[in-house]
Image (tube, helix red, strand yellow):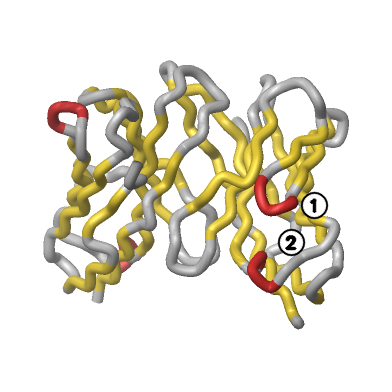
Amino acid sequence: DTGVSQDPRHKITKRGQNVTFRCDPISEHNRLYWYRQTLGQGPEFLTYFQNEAQLEKSRLLSDRFSAERPKGSFSTLEIQRTEQGDSAMYLCASSLRTGGGGELFFGEGSRLTVL
Amino acid sequence: AQSVTQLDSQVPVFEEAPVELRCNYSSSVSVYLFWYVQYPNQGLQLLLKYLSGSTLVKGINGFEAEFNKSQTSFHLRKPSVHISDTAEYFCAVSLLLQGAQKLVFGQGTRLTINP
């Protein structure tokens, strides 16, 4: 069990550029979540996949954001035309248990800095 | 709507002293409650969770938390802290979302252990 892995760990980009983050969940987990964490705040839910289906998107996820999970394995989160307000830590988590109460396993995050 | 309030943004304590990190939640339905810990430059790790049953929940690293329904609280405690407990601690409430759960996090409490 290698845990949830995220790539890249750090990304510095200029405003207006596009960036893409990748998340590899724990292999047998069928649920995958993206969260965003800004400095001094707790993580905020962005979106959720069950297998390859994206079942929920937060209002935080503007039309510049798109997430995919082809074949229900790894997931990508793309941000187009980045803005300085997009600077944050993007966290991916996965889980297996159905219903509530199951543990979410988090990756170490991808830190985005938009200059 | 469900929400979580962590009453202290920072808590400094001396090594081997007891500590309590406070968490209050609001929810109109039964909840699942969690405490996660985030060490510097790492992802979130589950400390403990309350699903049902005994209101006193024991977790890893000697931490425990007590669910108090009447006070809508889920405070985290440790009788004797160690330098290695220095980290950010997040309380979270679970919202069921199409068969899986969305965690709503508090703002976090930074625990600093002084020698």
Task: Report whether residue B6 is seen.
Answer: yes
Above or below, comparing residue B34 to residue B86 in the picture: above
- Residue plotted at (32% across, 64% down): A111
As drawn, the residue found furthest toward the front would be: A1
Q: Point out which mark residue B77 bears.
A: 1
Q: Amino acid at mark 2?
A: Asp
Specify whether B15 is left or right of A8: right
- Residue corresponding to mark 2: B8
Image x and y of residue A19, in percent: 16, 59
Specify whether A89 is left or right of B23: left
Q: Amino acid at mark 1?
A: Arg
Disc 1 packing (10 Å; few <14; some 14–19; many ≥20): some
Q: Quadrant of the N terminus of chain A?
A: top left
Task: Report whether residue A60 is seen.
Answer: no
- Residue plotted at (80% across, 52% down): B77
Residue A58 falls in which quadrant of the image?
Answer: top left
Q: Chain of mark 1?
A: B
Q: Quadrant of the C terminus of chain A?
A: bottom left
Image x and y of residue B31, in percent: 66, 26
- Residue plotted at (65% across, 41% down): B48
* Dot in front, 2 or 1: 1
Specify whether A22 is left or right of B62: left
Query: Are the residues at dot 2 and dot 1 in contact (C-beta closer than 8 Å)?
Result: no
Q: Chain of mark 2?
A: B
